[in-house]
Image: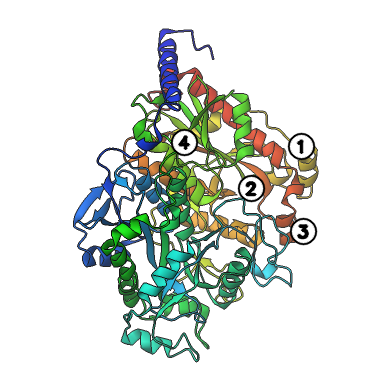
Amino acid sequence: MNITSNGWAVAWLRRMSMALMTALALVHTVPAQAAHPHGARPVKVLIISMFGPEGQGWVEHYKLTEEVKVPGLSPDYPTVHCNDDDICQITTGMGHANVAASITALVFSQRFDLRHAYFLMAGIAGIDPSQGTLGTATWARYLVDYGIAWEIDARDVPTSWPSGYTGINTKSPFEKPPLDYRNEVFQLDEDLLQKALALSSGVVLEDSDTARAYRANWPTAPANQPPKVVQCDTAAGDTWWHGAILEQRAQDWTKLLTDGKGTYCTTQQEDNATYEALKRGAAAGLLDIKRVAVLRTASNFDRPYPGQTAYDSLVNSISGGFVPSIHNLVKAGSPLVDDIVSSWPTWKAWKTHARTGGKAHHPFWALPRLKLPVKVLVISMFGPEAQPWIDAYKLKIDITVPGLSPDYPAVHCNLHGLCNLTTGMGYANAGASVTALMHSGKFDFSQTYIVIAGIAGINPELGTVGSAAWARWVVDYGLAWELDPREMPAGWDTGYFGINTKGPNEKPPLDYRTEVFHLNDALVDKAYALSQKAKLLDSPEAIAFRAKFPSGPARQPPKVIQCDTMSGNTWFAGTRLGQRATQWTQLMTDGAGRYCTTQQEDNATLEALKRVDALGLIDFQRVAILRTGADFDRPYPGQLDVDGLLKYAEQGGFVPATQNLVNAGRPLVDAILGNWRQWKRGVPTR
């Protein structure tokens, strides 16, 4: 593109250059002590709830009548509730995507001074009957992510595997995985944990007649005993699993990831993503990560009592634990909150870890209001996806943004209006990074086209390794109930089914608001049309591997296609789970979607973007998703599922897939940059 060919381009270049020079100059001039805006509301305790009933008890107990509206929170819970004692409460929305977006938006909102705040993550959970009972209140030492894993259908695993799950890039469930996502396991501050336990140990917890009757079905303690306060650990994952087999997997997984030190007892959907977002704030000097406590109370058992089926335990049982667990959040958590507030000078000075000086982190309110205009933002998830864009478009201007992944702390730009963000892998990283960028105040994204571009597994019925697929529908794979297929009802094809449904063929209520997204048809069609003639890279290894498929797209050279994508932290593989993905996409899109790629981030990224679209910071109609096939999501005929998964790198698709992100995406990006006057107004009709 010749950027000096007309007056508007010259003016835009001058504006971009001036903004860049001003912002970059401030990197050396903003004092470290400017980390909080004048008038930010001080907070002593921030209580983090995930949905309405968890938060309401705190609001009533502490008379949290002051409402502070925070841009970027869940549309269901747009305000933070506070009182004169500087106790505040936020409700995030359920699941990894919601909590990552909400907590990051709050931490970087400039509206609260959190440097000395204590954070109490407090919600209900399922409980292991060997560790507690209905109503039990548990303080966690370890937070373990249950969902960041590989999975094949348990009916197709090797005989030595106890379940269908194993760590990513391991050879068996008994091998600890490399912690490449940085949020697989966290250990909380031991002194704060012990203080919380000591303060709440004598609390008499609420019970109910229904809960007493239900727990009597258990023959042994502590399941059949009244609730009490205990210390044990929690496992987070969007998939709401249930049953003895998957419960055993949670126990084993917790031991494995904590090197034998953790004891699993509760299962929930949010805590690792919440902690990751707080950790980003701590890295920016905005809070003290040592001041985080996690309280989970038991609303239900995580498996059936003897003689009961796993299905009935999950779907049909009325255990009576919900109301006591809601009330016991306040009963068990308020002693800690009260002590912090009543002895604030002591608690404020306690083991201070927050950064109060040294190198500046340049929060967005300390930077000039002159924002860098961006025409195209490419969102990558890890380094090899980003590097081809950085090389092809000479993205040599690095702009550090507080709240991004420590592995990818800068946005890379050029003077033509193209920037790249790398988020880190998985829901927590994607949601936190995108939210932090959008709220940074350093960029003008109001007219930006956003291309989410990453590699994926691919359905051999619709594409092959190296294929590039533009998505119209984006479906969450993980927000579901799951039974191990060896415990599911007879006649079912899969152990997965919608939350609060009766079976796999029933569409669930979309209570999370992140289950399914539909992108702008006009942009999808335009991107697809522009990239039809793109020359895609192939490899000898990919050519040899795809020849093992007898027919169809799997056997053909890669090309640009249009089909839809599925997100989830759990990296599934195999014929049965691939079929489940096809059926789930059809169900969630009312028959309109066609599943072809599987990845770990896009629903979380889209939720973060949807939140800022509501604020007018971006135009959600300008978001496109390109996924390229790095490997097949199922084996070729005659190959075992486990070999297809563990030996995915042998398919030869990684290098073509990463390069084809640019090869297939470049026609769209070049069209936008080269014809900005037209694209600025919207997607051209021809």
Could you tell which of marks 3 and 1 lies nearer the N-terminus? 1
Residue 506 screen position, x and y as percent: 45, 65
User: Three-letter amino acid code at disc 3?
Assistant: Gln
The answer to which of 378 and 635 lies nearer the viewer is 378
Give the spatial CA distance, label 4 vs label 1: 46 Å
> Relative to residue 94, is residue 543 drawn left or right?
right
The residue under label 3 is 639
Work out how far the residue at label 1 is from the one at label 2, CA to CA, in angstroms. 16 Å
Is the Cβ of the residue at disc 1 closer than 8 Å to that at disc 2?
Answer: no
Circles 4 and 1: CB atoms closer than 8 Å:
no
The amino acid beneath tag 4 is Lys
Helix, strand or loop under label 2: strand
Q: How far apart are marks 2 and 4 (CA)?
A: 44 Å
| Residues packed near mark 4 inside 10 Å, few (<14), some (14 to 19) or many (20 plus) | some
Residue 684 lies, with reference to residue 40, above or below; the image says: above
> The residue under label 1 is which amino acid type?
Ser
- Please identify, in this view, whether the residue under mark 3 or under mark 1 is nearer the observer: 1
- Image check: 81 left or right of 420? left
The quarter of the picture where residue 174 lies is bottom right
Disc tally is 4
- The label nearer to you, 4 versus 1, is 4
Residue 209 image offset from top left, x and y in percent: 32, 87
Report if the CB atoms under discs 3 and 4 are less than 8 Å apart. no
User: Which residue position is annotated with label 2?
Assistant: 458
Which numbered tag is attached to residue 359?
4
> Disc 3 vs disc 4: which is toward the camera?
4
Q: Which residue is drawn at 55% across and 63% down?
A: 146
Q: Nearer the viewer, mark 2 or mark 4?
A: 4
